[in-house]
Image: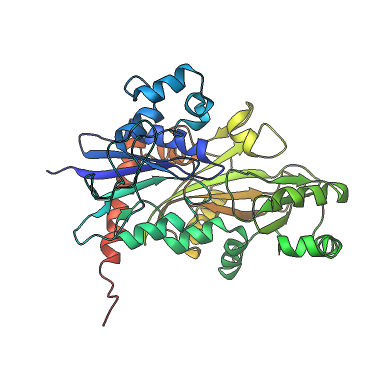
Amino acid sequence: MKKLRVGVLFGGRSGEHEVSLLSAASVLKAINRKKYEIVPIGITKGGRWVTSSDAERLLGGDSGTLPASTERNLRAGDPETTSAAAVLARGESVIVPPVPSDGKTGTLVPFETEAKGLELRANAASGPVLNLDVIFPVLHGTFGEDGTIQGLFELAGIAYVGSGVLGSAAGMDKDVMKRLFAAAKLPIPRHVSFLRAEWESGAKKIIAKIEGALKYPLFVKPANLGSSVGITKVHNRKELAPAIDTAAGFDRKIVVEQGVGGKKGKARELEVAVLGNDRPEASVVGEIVPGKEFYDYEAKYLSEGSYPIIPAKITKQQSKTIREMAIAAFQACDCSGLARVDFLMDPASNSSRAPRIYLNEINTLPGFTSISMYPKLWAASGVAYPDLIDRLIALALERRAEKDRTNYSR
């Protein structure tokens, strides 16, 4: 059988660039190369698309086969080429985003295949077309899971892993996401949303609105960002304005949530992995025990002390409720392929009342390293990492076939 040609797209311009590199490295290591022909495609932090062999060599830190100009930079200690956080900062070929194709596969057309040093000249006719059957976008955050790159794939007619434009955009925007959850009658923490412009023109009014609707402690978040970047836990009014300023530096829309559990203690952080298209399935429930006051970026990726518990130590009924809510959240945002759904549970109390469970958010392109929660939850549910990649590629092709049934003209 002819191998499927899979483009693994990674890097990107978001603040989660480094996380994307880790996810892509795991996918490239685990994917079945007897079954798929792999085309690694990187996007630098500056938005430059680097092709195939250069992208994979740079991702793996192999400089032995790079051109002499790049080797000189490595020996000179050029931070753009030596920093682990910028392994995609150099590339010898650049590709333009997808363009429509008349064939059964979408196309990615290089500007060129040869370059003198690092100087690039646009020449679309000089290089071969990269025909792809499916793209696996291992892109986290802005420009990767917010519907923008998905729009390019739709225009190109390329099958791709994950949610479409709507599901991706809704899953990225915490304000819109919460509106959809509320419409589906799913329990969510109390919150207030507002625009950066409103904050800058009337800070006192915004603070009064927040304090009139919510109780401390609060979580202040940029609406469109992932990996807990720009999120601050606020204990009192003195901390509120600086936290809003921080969030406003990352997005034009800010969401302020009332902390689940209040001052009694930290909420339990529970997660479920969802897989599927029109008939999604939910994994077992896992719990993250953060090493810090909450599971922020540092706790996720930089410091030690956080650890997962899979399956979470909850009752069968709680597990059933959470898994059903995860699927309902997935469907409420019109997601497909994959998503990780996060929940908050009231901390343990002495009351006879069962702890309340709140839907926190959905992540349509969660971390995908072999030790990330999404693959670990499925591994605990009986789906090994390589098999999970197979399932996601099959779902991408299934969704493309369903899309192709739609008429766009009379």
- Give above or below for 34 relative to 179: above
Q: Residue 156: x and y, percent?
A: 31, 59
At x 28%, y 36%, the residue is 114
For the C terminus, the quadrant is bottom left
**157 sits left or right of 356 in the view:** left
**181 sits left or right of 409 in the view:** right
Q: Residue 83: x and y, percent?
A: 52, 26
- Give above or below for 207 relative to 114: below
**Residue 173 visible in the displayed image:** yes
Most extreme residue toward the top is 75
Quarter of the image where one finds residue 376: top left
Most extreme residue toward the bottom is 410
At x 58%, y 40%, the residue is 287
- Give above or below for 401 relative to 49: below
Most extreme residue toward the left is 1
**Residue 192 visible in the displayed image:** no
Q: Residue 405: x and y, percent?
A: 25, 70
For the N terminus, the quadrant is top left
